[in-house]
Image (tube, rainbow, N blue to C red):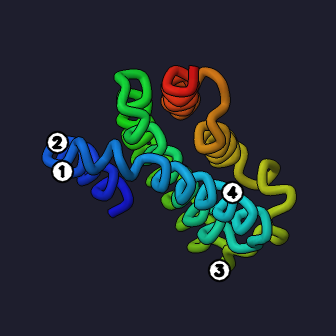
Amino acid sequence: MLKLGGFGFLRFSLGIFPEASAYFAPVIYAICVFGVVYASITTLQQIDLKKIIAYSSVGHMALVTVGIFSFNSQGIIGAILLMISHGIVSGAMFLCIGMLYERHKTRIIRYFSGLIHTMPLFGVFFITFTLANIGFPGTNSFIGEFLIIAGCFEINS
């Protein structure tokens, strides 16, 4: 559902109402920056793994919206890449958390210390997807976020 909002901005807002999109772009930027900061702070306070992924998804989609409203090819391509990457990575993260819940009957993060010793292959996949979710260099999320930031710098120079 989150990616559908980004598609709606690309298809309808920019396609049908380009002048209105340009007029309201500063308001959108302010809302998105507030959304990224608020979602990040809320994510840091969570102890439930599922809520951590959900709140970080909100922050990612606010960053996607900033990229869409940068009105240049770098920002829009970065937003599309981040939406695709987020769809794969967040789905994999929710799958991993579902597997942990089926095995341990809890999603509270403090109960999973030493998980790498009991489930080593799972731990490798979980760490890989976690690094991809935070935009570690070399992942598709990093490329999308980098292009979005490059597009924002381009419109501010």
Under circle 2, the secondary element is helix
Q: Kindly identify the amino acid type of the residue bearing the numbered disc 2.
A: Gly
Q: Which numbered disc, 4 or 3, marks the residue that appears first in the sequence? A: 4
Under circle 4, the secondary element is helix
Query: Disc 4, disc 3: CB below 8 Å?
Result: no
Under circle 1, the secondary element is helix
Mark 1 highlights which residue? 12
Q: Quadrant of residue 59?
A: bottom right
Task: Judge from the rendering whether residue 92 lies leftward or rightward of residue 34; answer left or right.
Answer: left
- Marks 1 and 3: which is nearer the front? 1
What residue sits 49% from the left and 59% below the top? 95
What residue sits 53% from the left and 67% below the top? 98
Which of the numbered marks, if any, corresponds to residue 37? 4
Q: Which numbered disc, 2 or 4, marks the residue that appears first in the sequence? A: 2
Mark 3 highlights which residue? 105
Q: Kindly identify the amino acid type of the residue bearing the numbered disc 4.
A: Val
Under circle 3, the secondary element is loop
Q: Is the residue 138 above or below the residue 30 in the image?
A: above
- Marks 4 and 3: which is nearer the front? 4
Query: Disc 1, disc 3: CB below 8 Å?
Result: no
- Marks 3 and 2: which is nearer the front? 2
Which of the numbered marks, if any, corresponds to residue 15? 2
